[in-house]
Image: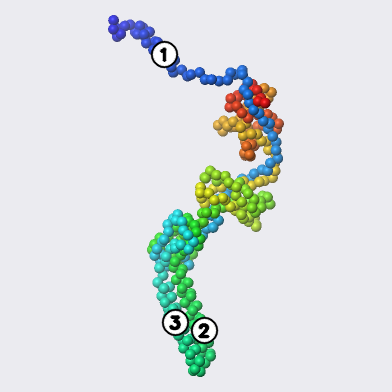
Amino acid sequence: MTPAALPRTVRSRRYLPVLLFVLVGLLPLPLTATPADEPVTVPVARVEAREIPSLVELTGTVQAAERAAISAKISGVVSRVAVSLGSTVAAGEVLVVLEAGEITARLRQAEAQLAQAKRHLERDRGLLAKNAATPETVRTRADQFAIAQAAHQEARSMLAYTTITAPFAGVITAKRVNAGDLATPGTVLFEMEDNRRLQVRTALPESLIARVRMGDQLSVQIPAAGVEVAAAVAEIGPAADPGSRSAAITLDLPQRADLRSGQFARVRVPGAAAMALLVPESAVVPSGQMDRVFVIEGDTARLRLVRTGLRRDGLLEILAGLDPGETVATGNNRLLESGRRVRVQP
C-alpha cells in the first residue's frame, strides 16, 4: 500500500517521532546557575559619611583668548580677497586688497609738493649764504617743507590702509566680504581668532567669588568633545554685575585638537563643605533609570533603590536610600536578589 493510501491516523503516527525530535531541538539548553539555597560570596564595604566640599556646576562657553574683528579704515572697492573661511594665516599676511585711486593720486600730489618744498628750501639757503635772502624767508621755507613732509607721510599711511593684513597668527572664523564689494570704515570684513589658546568664560555667583583665586585649578567638562580637564583661572572680574549678581571669570584650557571655540562647557567650583554618604562605585548596580544597592543584614542581602550624585576618586555619592554605617555588597552583586543568602568575603 502506498503512503498516500495509508489511513490518516497511521500517517500521523509515522511522522510523530520526527516532530518530537524537532521540538526537542528547539528547547533552550539548561543554564548553569547558582542554586537558590547556596550563599553567594560577596566583598563588602561600609557606607561612609564624610565632610566634603560641595561642587557648584556653572555653564560657560569655550572661546579664543585672542580674537579680532577685521574691518577697513578707509572706503574702497575690494579688488582681491586672499583668504577663505577656515584659512590659517600668519601674522602680517595679506587678507584683502582695496582699490582706492584717489588715495594714490593724493600720494603723488604729496610727493610733488614735498619735492617742490625741498627745492625752495635749498635755493633760499643758498641765497641766504650770499646775503640775497633773509633768515625769515628761510624759516618760512623750512616750515613749508615740514608741512609737505607730514602731508606725504599721511598720504603714504592712507595708501597702506588699502592692504589689510592679519594682526596675529590664527584662523579665519567668519568671512563677510567678496571681490567687488564696497568696504567702508567700521564694517566687519573678517573675524579671526588664535585657536592655539582657548579659554572658558563663565559667570561666577557673588556667593562664590571669595572662594576662587587667580591660578586656581577648576574642573571643566566639554560634553561635545567628551573631555574633562583641569583649567587655571586666568581672569576674575573686579565687580559683580548688578543684574545677575555674578562676576565674569575666564579659565585657560590646555591645548587640545578636539576643542573648538563656541563649545558648551561646564565648570565645577568648590562650594561650602557638607556631609555626604559615599560608597565604592562597584556597590551600585545600574538598572534602567534606577540604581540598586544590596545592603547586607546578617547573612541576607536586601535590595535598596538609591539616588546617586557625583563621583569622587572611585567613590560614588549617595543622595538618598542608605544610612551611614550600613554594609553594602561591592562584588557579585549582579547575582543577588532581595532576600538571597550571602557569605561575606573575609
Q: Earlier in the sequence, mark 3 or mark 1?
A: 1
The residue to which callout 3 is attached is 115
- Which residue is most to the bottom? 131
x, y percent for residue 224: 52, 45
Residue type (three-letter) at the residue carrying disc 3: Ala
44, above or below 223, in the image: above
Q: Tell me how far mark 1 sits from mark 2, CA to CA.
A: 119 Å
Q: Quadrant of residue 10?
A: top left
Q: Callout 1: few (<14), some (14-19), or many (20+) C-alpha neighbours within 10 Å?
A: few
Q: Is residue 95 above or below residue 249?
A: below
Q: Earlier in the sequence, mark 1 or mark 2?
A: 1
Frontmost of labels 3 and 2 is 3
Mark 2 = which residue?
A: 143
Three-letter amino acid code of the residue under disc 1: Phe
Identify the secondary structure beneath mark 3. Answer: helix
Quadrant housing the N terminus: top left
Q: Which mark is residue 252?
A: none
Asked if marks 1 and 2 touch (Cβ < 8 Å), the reply is: no
Which secondary structure lies at badge 2? helix
| Residue nearest the observer in this picture, 249 or 289 | 249
Q: Please state the horizontal and vertical placement of residue 271, each as a whole percent of the image.
A: 67, 46
* Residue 60 in view of the camera: yes
**Image position, residue 150 (x, y; %):** 50, 77
Q: CA distance from mark 3 to mark 2?
A: 14 Å
Q: Secondary structure at mark 1?
A: helix
Give the labeled residue for mark 1. 21
Q: CA distance from mark 3 to mark 1?
A: 115 Å
Label pair 3/1, CB-CB below 8 angstroms: no
Comes first in the chain, label 3 or label 2: 3
Q: Is residue 220 shown left or right of residue 186?
A: right
| Amino acid on which disc 2 is placed | Asp
Q: Measured along the vertical axis of the image, is residue 168 above or below residue 29?
A: below
